[in-house]
Image (cartoon, rainbow, N blue to C red):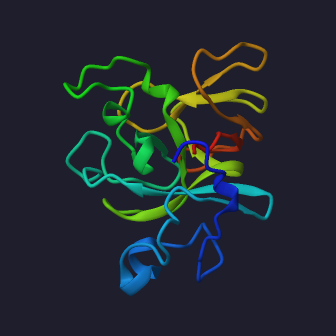
Amino acid sequence: MAGFNQYRRVLTIPTGDPFKWHGNTDGLNGVGLLEPGELGGVLPWQGEQFQLVKMDSGATATPASGIPAIGEIAFWKDRSNYLVTNDSTQADAASTAGAVTKDPRNSVAGVIEMAVVAGEFFFVHQKGNSNVKTSSTPVPGDVLVANTGTSADCGSVTAGTAPTSQEIGIVTSATKTGGLIPAKLVIQFID
């Protein structure tokens, strides 16, 4: 809904914690949202920012990107319906024929903070501190950008160099654990 201020929505989260809330297990009757109109709502929580989205039904083990995992990048697949995917080839930057018409790296919705399944409602992390999947070895101050390819991870741009695609965050520590690097996210929400 263009022009609607998402911060005005009141979101119902029984657990109170967007890192742990699953729409399919904690939602109304175990599936979906608790209240109509919540999808797309932005949740400021403890100095962080999250947006309520739905994982694409095609986010399964079959595509090269695999099942969505913690620390992976979520790409917008359909912004008007707040639908995301971890498969950059399915990002809204691709045409219906599958040919990329824009750079999918400019279609980042946020970072996935919990294990989610296809079709599930969840909060994507957009601002604040997170551990983000990366195949590179960035240092503090480097800018994270989405990688090209199907791994739903980040590459990095050296501090002081202008990135050529959407910024995801700024690296805050060189300590990489399990392929995840600490970063301060700077992703914008959409109306």
Which image quadrant for residue 187?
Answer: top right
Q: In screen coordinates, is 93 left or right of 9?
A: left
Location of residue 173 in the rendering, given as x and y in whole percent from the top left corner: 76, 41
- The correct choice, above or below, for 76 with respect to 17 in the image is above
- Measured as percent of width and height from the top left, residue 67 is found at 33, 53
Residue 116 in the image: above or below residue 153: below
Check the picture and name the quadrant holding the C terminus. Answer: top right
x%, y% of residue 183?
70, 42
Q: Is residue 147 visible?
A: no
Provide residue 117's location: percent of width, then percent of height.
Answer: 34, 63
Residue at horizontal 52%, vertical 36%?
Answer: 108
Closer to us: 50 or 134: 50
| Residue 7 shows in this picture | yes
Q: Residue at the spot x=58%, y=59% of the render?
A: 41
User: Measuring 59% from the left and 45% from the top, which residue is drawn there?
Assistant: 132
Relative side of 25 to 96, left or right: right
Q: Residue lying furthest bottom in this view?
A: 29
Asked where in the image residue 28 lies, by quadrant, the reply is bottom left
In the image shown, does 115 or 118 lie closer to the viewer?
Answer: 118
Residue drawn 51% across the image and 26% down it: 106
Q: Is residue 74 above or below residue 105?
A: below
